[in-house]
Image (cartoon, coloured by chain):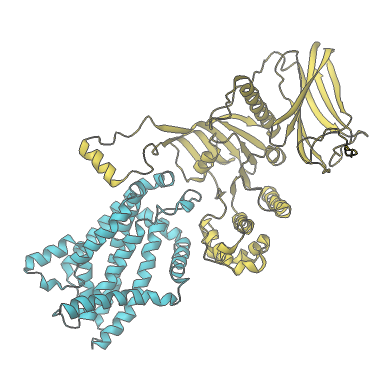
Amino acid sequence: MSGTKHAVVVTNVAKHFKKSAKRREYTTFKSELVRFIKGERAAIETSLHIEALKGVDLAVPKGSTVGIIGRNGSGKSTLLKLITGIYTPTSGTVQVNGRISALLELGAGFHPDFTGRENILINGIILGMSRADVKARMTEIIEFAELGDFIDEPVRTYSSGMFMRLAFAVATHVDPEILIVDEILSVGDEHFSKKSQAKMSEFKASGKTILLVTHSLDTVEQWCDLAVWIDGGRTRLIGSPKHVVAEYRRAVNAAEAQSEKTGHSALSAPGLALPETVRPQSTQETLRATTVSVVDARGQRPEAFGADAPLDVVVDFEATAAQSGECSVDVQTADGRLLFSTTFVAGALPVGRGRVRLSFPRAGLGEGSWTIAASMHAPSVTPQTAATTSFLVDAHPGVGLVRPLHTWSLEAPAR
Amino acid sequence: MIRNLRELYQYRALLWALTVRELRARYRASVLGFLWTFLNPTLSMAVYVFVFGWLMESDTARFPYFVFSGLIPWIYFSSSVGAGTSAVSERRDLLTKVRFPAQVLPATVVLTNAINFLLSIPLLVLLGVVYGQWPTWHFVFIVPLLLVQTLFTLAITYVVSAMNVAFRDLQHIMGNILQLGFFLTPVIWRIEQVKTLEQQQLVVLLNPVAALVEAWHDIFFRQRVPAAMPLAVVTVLSLVMMWLASTLFEHRREEFAELI
């Protein structure tokens, strides 16, 4: 854990908040005085602590892009604020090597009565640039924001999209060594979104360290070198994005399945940890899916599949001991929700490599990005996801998650 | 304290940018614009001159000039403290989203008012000329006096802005405290009108702002070297206050982002 290889080192960090909002929002002089006179001096609610983070360890290598995932209320944003230095940890240490720029909220400190140009200057300085720096980059920022003549109008006249574009433009031109981003890559329309993603690629390519909090698991898989799953205020899993995202999806699915059975959900209480997924160690090594791919009728992988075109899921696996096995394939939405799952009893498998094919005569899925999670496992064992892949489905006349086979007809009116 | 001031210096670009914005924002939507900087103290002076000079027939010579020379340093102090009280607590948008030293916020308020004060000085000099008082060499004391007053004002502003984060009703009380302070400070009355010399010294001793305002009176109105003793006391007091305020601010500022 030396400081030179890592941009950020978080060691066993805990953060507690005083729950002050019990009776009133803020303490007042009057209430403090009354308490003082009554002799209840500072009988402050030590029991009313909120433990936002209970013990987080994290080492971010320099130049890497790290995605932080987890449920709402799991402590992701608190962690970012600790790394940024807005909060100080209750215990543990946060070590940062390099100049940080944090995009926790776009447009912090914008003044509505001032023009875009004036706000760029202030916001740039707030984010840590010097006046000369901002002025030097002014044209670049204005061009990036695509505001046209509006740049000399007061910000209060902007549409929310324009506001966000301007804020994003300033924030990404700060030129930090470490960039901390909280769920902002989806700014603006398709065009601007592409542009902002290109900007992030540029950051990545120039060897800057990026810390990203997002609920878009696709983003994590596509962009990040490392994924961190924060759950219930602790680091639950750190590893390759594919692995962590798959595990996260499994836990969310398990929680959903559980809530269907018991009627109350682990997902409804914010900040509560997700249930543990069962993982027998015995079969883990002897049978596993190595890769999964999605191909069309010609065995090739198109940029996007047609909703009505055939689609095959090909699972390659490896068995190191002869055993009976099953193959499970989950189809998930881009945000990790299970659309459906199917299991195939493959029977006795010899030692060595093998392949399982799952054929859909037509994809039958709605437009968008989909994820396949495939696993090989012993019978009646909770599948352990080992391989995932994502693919796109093209636009089609229908709307929605699925596109079942259907026909329309006009019937003669009844007389 | 040194660290506090050093950080202020490091973030001088931000301090300056926020101050300029503050100055421009204040008058942006008004017709008279920047003229309000001069109009506000002038109108206040007119009110006091009308009530105390004309209706109550004050015996002070060149009364408007006297009032103005005490009023503008008082306004510098009271506006800084008054507006500074909520300087930290109302900037939730900044403090919870960006990392920067929070003392920039109260310092911005003080600097804004310091600039307004400086801009009012030519008007004061002009008024003096109207009453036949041309500038004298005593004006050299403006610089050190301004420094001491700024240090003192900044210290008080730090304390109240930090306290207001935890006790939000402070910002409502501050107006009344400042009003009391105004009447306890020799702006519309002369220190000589206090009965005994001991009482006069007591006023100056218990109210550092009175000592400061008296020094401004000395420079502009009485045209003499400001009394050394009270100023020395205020200077030492300001340094101690500044040290205490910086320490308090330093201890408290970690809580700001969580409390506001």
The residue sitting at 89% across, 30% down in the picture is A361
> In this rendering, is residue B13 above or below A331?
below
Q: How many marks?
A: 0
A377 vs B236, left or right, is right
Q: Position of residue A165 (x, y in %)?
A: 64, 57
The residue sitting at 25% across, 38% down in the picture is A35
Q: Position of residue A204 (x, y in %)?
A: 68, 47
The hue used for chain B is cyan
Q: Residue furthest front?
A: A415
The answer to whether residue A374 is seen in the rendering is: no
B59 vs A22, left or right, is left
The hue used for chain A is yellow
Q: Position of residue B36 (x, y in %)?
A: 39, 75
Q: Quadrant of the rendered structure where residue B200 is?
A: bottom left
> In this rendering, is residue A26 above or below A107?
above
Front-lying residue, B152 or A190: A190
> In this rendering, is residue B252 above or below A135?
above
> In this rendering, is residue A188 above or below B202?
above
A231 vs A307, left or right, is left
Q: Quadrant of the rendered structure where residue B182 is?
A: bottom left
Q: Position of residue B196 (x, y in %)?
A: 6, 68
Q: Quadrant of the rendered structure where residue B207 is?
A: bottom left
Q: Residue furthest right?
A: A298
Figure quadrant of the C terminus of chain A: top right
